[in-house]
DNA sequence: TACTTGGTTTCACTTATTAAAACCATTGTT
DNA sequence: AACAATGGTTTTAATAAGTGAAACCAAGTA
């Protein structure tokens, strides 16, 4: 193999740590895995994998499942996440505005960011209505089929948006899902132009969603806020009003984050 | 120093990973820290700390705060935690029983485990009552002043319980908090004898709590369930009934976890 | 402009991680 | 009961990988 010291794994990445992180992610994806399974997935010798496991286990980052003796993520993760959420300036800044939206419309209000090419919900105020469809905090959705995802993507350089699209493959989830890059490209343009994104049954039949992007003090998209619910509550007659309020809320959050709109 | 190859840091711990984990925990505790602050806290050279940071950052485990450029935990943590919670057999097993308790009494129902010597709440069903005091999932409390903590500790070998006590210092939080090991020891004995723990305003004035331990299939305490609320709802006349139900619920969970009580 | 602070990069040194292999404990099979 | 199979634990020499000193750079500030 070309060992010209080349194919640098980012040159400064500490490989041991990287393996440990991969191991953690594997456990997150697959639930619980045995030493041998992890050995194979990591493509590392058993003893190395073992030492990584020991290290993580001693610190409570992973535990051993009581039933099958396999390894799984430890409760420690929960402590970390709580600190993270509590100090997330985006979440803090958004909460008050989200509450206002929730009170005004009674529908579900979501706050999401882009992580690993997917929309990750970091806060959700549940709808008060009997007919509701709610994700939970920490759950993920494909970006191309959600209001939040499109709102965020619309504010990224086109290059980045295309990479996202390639990465997720633009899978169709309903008849309305945008499944081709060309159409998505145009859609993002439209979203950018009007300042908010619509999801018309693109991820779930019968559900609609209006989303607007939130910017940080450097003017970079940080996430998006959305209002979502059963489609009969998002009729053509109501959309203008809802969109205006969602955009207002998102802008208020951006302002709290230190974003000062140019002119 | 005696460098006889001795004072082995657990011999098999991978130090680089250990440092990375420490860094993560530091960020969880302190919120956000700069490279230099982390360098000092870890007592490592700047470049080493830097490489650790880079590695974690590339993987989304830590982010950079937009405001001050300091490092903080990344949203990725949330994804990990969600998977963890979803697959936690304890939480899954407990949820149904917790709901029943919640419906029956309307008070707050908690599920907690012991992590790093503290009670960590991994599920909470909020009270329906106007006067309520609720922790949030992921928050922590000292074990000696909570029903859950005492319920769990009562099932540990005395040695372990004493270590816990030493570690947390048995700080007094209210007039009722048990502040001495001797008294706590006796209390744990009593808890063990009757099968449930009481917290009578030991952590917050005016609040009471009844907790019972949950065991895994090896018969080891895995956590505890509790019902908590304003003290007037936990009067002497009601305690027997509540305790019986909480114990019943906890036992049901233990059974779901595979625990078969001896005889 | 010079000074400070905090982040980024380099590189020779050497320690800490690797990987192969042996070991052990448990479980299931004949 | 003996045997193989499975999965986890421990050892060790070889060396790849991480360290740490120091230089560098960029941004802010006096």
Image (cartoon, coloured by chain):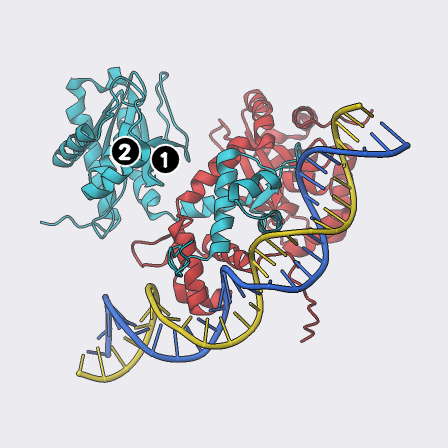
Chain colours: A cyan, B red, C yellow, D blue
* Residue in view at x 53 percent, y 59 percent: B16
Q: In this view, does A5 lie above or below B160?
A: below
Extreme-front residue of the structure: A1
Residue B51 in sight: yes
Quarter of the view holding residue D27: bottom left
- Residue A67 drawn at (x, y percent): 66, 32
Residue D4 vertical position relative to residue B77 in the rendered view, above or below: above
Q: Is residue A178 above or below residue B196?
A: above
Chain of residue at mark 1: A
What SS does tag 1 mark?
strand
Q: Distance between the residues labelled 1 and 2?
A: 9 Å
Read off the residue under disc 1: A121
Crowd tier of the residue under label 2, counting other residues whose Cα lies within 10 Å: few below 14, some 14–19, many 20 or above? many
Residue B152 horizontal/vertical position (percent): 68, 40
- Mark 1 vs mark 2: which is more N-terminal? 1
Q: Pointers 1 and 2 in contact (CB under 8 A)?
A: yes
Name the residue at 61% across, 38% down.
A34
Q: Quadrant of residue B32?
A: bottom left
Identify the residue at the far left of this view. Answer: A263
- Is A81 left, or right, of A95 in this rendering? right
Q: How crowded is mark 1: few (under 14 residues within 10 Å), some or many (20 or more)?
A: many
Figure label count: 2
Which one is nearer the viewer's eye here, B41 or A171? A171
Residue A196 as seen in the image, left or right of residue A143: left
Q: Nearer the viewer, residue A151 or B263?
A: A151
- The residue that label 2 is drawn on is A148
- Residue B260, given in percent of the width and then of the height, sits at 75, 26
**B120 vs B47: above or below:** above
Residue at 16% across, 18% down: A236
Q: Can you give x and y, in whole percent of width and height, for residue A62 in the image?
A: 57, 44
Secondary structure, mark 2, is helix
């Amino acid at each position: 193999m070309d060992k010209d010291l080349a194919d640098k794994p980012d040159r400064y990445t500490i490989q041991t740590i990287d393996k440990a992180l991969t191991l953690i992610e594997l456990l997150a994806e697959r639930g619980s895995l045995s030493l041998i399974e992890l050995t194979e997935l990591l493509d590392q010798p058993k003893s190395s994998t073992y030492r990584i496991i020991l290290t993580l286990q001693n610190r409570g980052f992973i535990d051993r499942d009581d039933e099958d003796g396999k390894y799984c993520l430890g409760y420690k993760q929960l402590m970390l996440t709580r600190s993270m959420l509590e100090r997330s300036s985006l979440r803090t800044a958004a909460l008050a505005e989200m509450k206002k939206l929730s009170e005004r419309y009674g529908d579900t209000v979501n706050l999401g960011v882009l992580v690993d090419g997917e929309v990750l919900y970091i806060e959700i105020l549940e709808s008060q209505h009997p007919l509701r469809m709610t994700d939970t905090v920490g759950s993920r959705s494909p970006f191309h089929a959600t209001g939040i995802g499109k709102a965020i993507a619309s504010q990224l350089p086109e290059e980045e948006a295309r990479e996202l699209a390639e990465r997720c493959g633009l899978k169709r989830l309903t008849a309305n899902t945008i499944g081709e890059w060309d159409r998505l490209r145009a859609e993002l343009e439209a979203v950018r132009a009007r300042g908010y994104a619509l999801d018309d049954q693109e991820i779930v039949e019968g559900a609609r969603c209006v989303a607007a992007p939130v910017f940080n003090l450097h003017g970079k998209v940080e996430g998006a806020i959305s209002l979502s619910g059963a489609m009969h509550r998002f009729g053509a007659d109501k959309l203008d009003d809802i969109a205006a309020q969602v955009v207002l809320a998102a802008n208020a959050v951006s302002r709290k984050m230190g974003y000062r709109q140019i002119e």
